[in-house]
Amino acid sequence: MFNVTVLRLKDIVKYIICIFVLILLVFSITNYFSGTKKNTEQVTQKVENVTNQLSSHSLLSCLDATLPVVASINHSEEKEKEKLSENDILKSMLETQISSIDEIQNMEVSETEGENTENANETEQEAELATTDVGTEVITNNPIAENYNAQYGNVKIRNQTDYELTQEMLTPDITIENKNIMIFHTHSCESYTSSELYPYTPTGNFRTTDLNFTVTRVGTELTTQLQQYGYNVIHDTSYHDYPSYNGSYTNSLKTVESLLQTNPSDIIIDLHRDAIGSRSDYAPTVKIGDEEAAQIMFVIGTNAGGLWHPNWNQNLKFAIKVQEKAEELYPGLFKPIMLTTSRYNQHTGKYANIIEVGATGNTLEQCLTSMKYLAKVMDEIMK
């Protein structure tokens, strides 16, 4: 007998659908696991990339990539570092150059030692001290007649006050203890006749603001000469008559009072040039040896004008003491002392005075020569 299996159509369709669903399921599962593997590989690649970045960059680089603000700050810091690095390089270059310059300067110093010695010798010659036992003669052309009404020995005095000068008032019985010397100029711009050796461009009637050609330059020469003898000298070269001539004595008084606070001095010299308004060619001159020197004149103030000035007689005694020695060494170097009713700021010191060197007709070189002899006379009375 044959066994016959009867399949119904309904069952066949059912089986086919099940097989189809099974195939789809298998296909889905395969795709799922395949995609997971691919994603895993991508993730792994990304992790490797990050790891490489971390290994090749600093933490700051990572922060730069993450936060723009941090990147900006770090970028600025990098620029500063670059600048510092450049500065270090420049500094190193400059130090190298300076070192080279120092070596060159040292070579120049060693090469010019002989020249400096020669210059020093020339300076000593320029500041040559005065000698004595030389002939002296007044050689003023068209001189103005001497006018004096008092005398102490060979010292002549033109007394313009009402004071009667007694022998006691004129005797120079003073002892100079404080030998500090102060020199200044109430009329700093007073100048002389231009010469071939000292030509200048005037900025007024026998006046110039270039102090190399004025009485201020004469003060420098006197300072140099006195320092050669070992005296402590303060020379103030301030303008007191410029830009305004009015108030010159008020200005110079402030200067003197200020200097005295740190440089106490008994001998205070206000160095001027004589001004003869009607005689611009007036040049009081004395020949000492083979040199021509401008004549000098003391102007001593008093309290006759009503201003407080208790030590004017001391000032006068100092002037007489200096001029007495000058008449002994270089007769004619000084003109008669002028005693006036004005004070001229001379209340500031025991031996304060005005010294007028030459006049408008003298040359600067004649006045510079005078300072050599004045310094010698002053040294003689202060030894």
Image (cartoon, grey):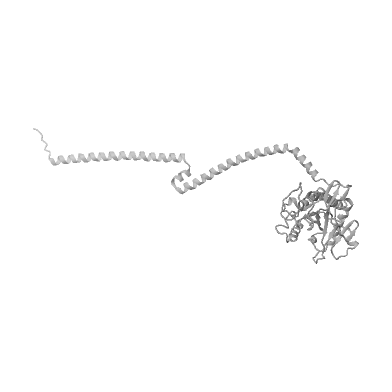
Q: Position of residue 124 (x, y in %)?
A: 80, 44
87 left or right, relative to 42: right
Q: Front-most of 125 and 108?
A: 125
Residue under the image location 56 percent in, 44 percent down:
84
Where residue 159 sits, quadrant-wise, is: bottom right
Residue under the image location 37 percent in, 41 percent down:
43
Q: Quadrant of the N terminus?
A: top left
- Whether residue 272 is visible here, answered yes or no, is no
Where residue 49 sits, quadrant-wise, is: top left
Q: Position of residue 114 (x, y in %)?
A: 76, 37
Q: Front-most of 163 and 77?
A: 163
Q: Position of residue 202 (x, y in %)?
A: 72, 53
- Whether residue 83 is visible here, answered yes or no, is yes
Q: Position of residue 312 (x, y in %)?
A: 83, 62
Q: How many marks?
A: 0
16 left or right, relative to 75: left
Where residue 42 sits, quadrant-wise, is: top left
Q: Front-most of 377 and 294?
A: 294
Residue at the outermost top position: 1
136 left or right, relative to 77: right
